[in-house]
Amino acid sequence: MEDNIAKTISNARIFGSLSSEDVNALIKLGEKRHWPKGGQIIREGDIGDALYIILSGRLKVVLYGEEGKEIVLSIMKEGDIFGEMALFDGEPRSANVEVMEDAECLVIHGNALMEYIKTHPAVAINFLSHLSRRLREADRQIGGLALLDVCGRIAHTFLGIANPSGKTEKGVVAIERLTHEEIAAMIGSSREVVSRALKKMSQEGYVEIEKEKFILHI
C-alpha cells in the first residue's frame, strides 16, 4: 500500500523531483483519511493546520456568494495537493474543498511538515515552485474570465483542467466529462448559456462530447 502512495506522490507535479527518501519521509509524516461523495474536507474561514495530497477521487475548490451561488475555482484529482497556503501565510482557509467522488488523501499536519521543510531545502524549493505556478494559473484564469466570450472561457477552462502547463499533443485535449452546471460555476455563467455554447462548439467541430469525456480540438 505504501508503494502505491509513493507512486502517486512521485507522479505529482509538485513532488516529481524529490528523492525517494524525501517521498517516503513525507508518507511517514502523514495519515490516510477517506471522505465520501458530498463530504466537505475544508471550510472557508477555518484555521489551516494540514496539507492534503489526493490519493484517489475528485474534489472541487468552491466559494459561495451571498445568495448561495456556487463559484468553482478548480477541480482536483489524484496527485494534486491543497491546504498549503494557510500553512505558509497563517491566514484562515480561503475557500471550501468538497468531495465530488469518494476520495482518499494523505494528510500531513502542518507542524510536522514545517519542521521537515526547515532541514530539507529540496522540499522547500518544490513548494516555492508550486506556489509560483499557482499564481501564474490564477493570472491565466482571471485573464480568461475577463477577456474571452463564453466559448473561449469553456475552451480556456478545459485546457487548464487537462494540462495546466498548456502543452498538448496533436492539438487534441481530452478531459473527464463535467456537468453543464459544473462548467457554468467555473466560468461564471449559467447552465443554459453553457449548454448553448457547447452545442455551438460541437456543431463547429471544436468539441466532441462523449459519454465520459469532452475532446477539445485546438
Image (cartoon, rainbow, N blue to C red):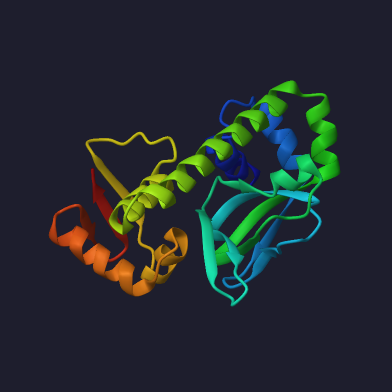
What residue lies at 60% left-to-right and 63% top-to-bottom? 63
Q: How many marks?
A: 0
- 178 in relation to 110, above or below: below
Q: Residue furthest left?
A: 204
- 201 in relation to 84, above or below: below
Q: Is residue 160 left or right of residue 37?
A: left
Q: Residue furthest front?
A: 147
Q: Is residue 195 left or right of residue 56?
A: left
What residue lies at 44% left-to-right and 40% top-to-bottom? 164
Residue 201, percent from left and from top? 21, 58
Q: Can residue 100 be spotted in the picture?
A: yes
Q: Can residue 15 be spotted in the picture?
A: no
Residue 56, percent from left and from top? 55, 55
Residue 89, percent from left and from top? 78, 41
What residue lies at 55% left-to-right and 45% top-to-bottom? 79
- 70 in relation to 213, above or below: below
Q: Is residue 84 left or right of residue 153?
A: right
Residue 105, percent from left and from top? 65, 54
Displayed quadrant of residue 132: top right
Displayed quadrant of residue 4: top right
**Image quarter in which the C terminus is found:** top left
What residue lies at 81% left-to-right and 51% top-to-bottom? 49
Q: Nearer the viewer, residue 76 or 27?
A: 76
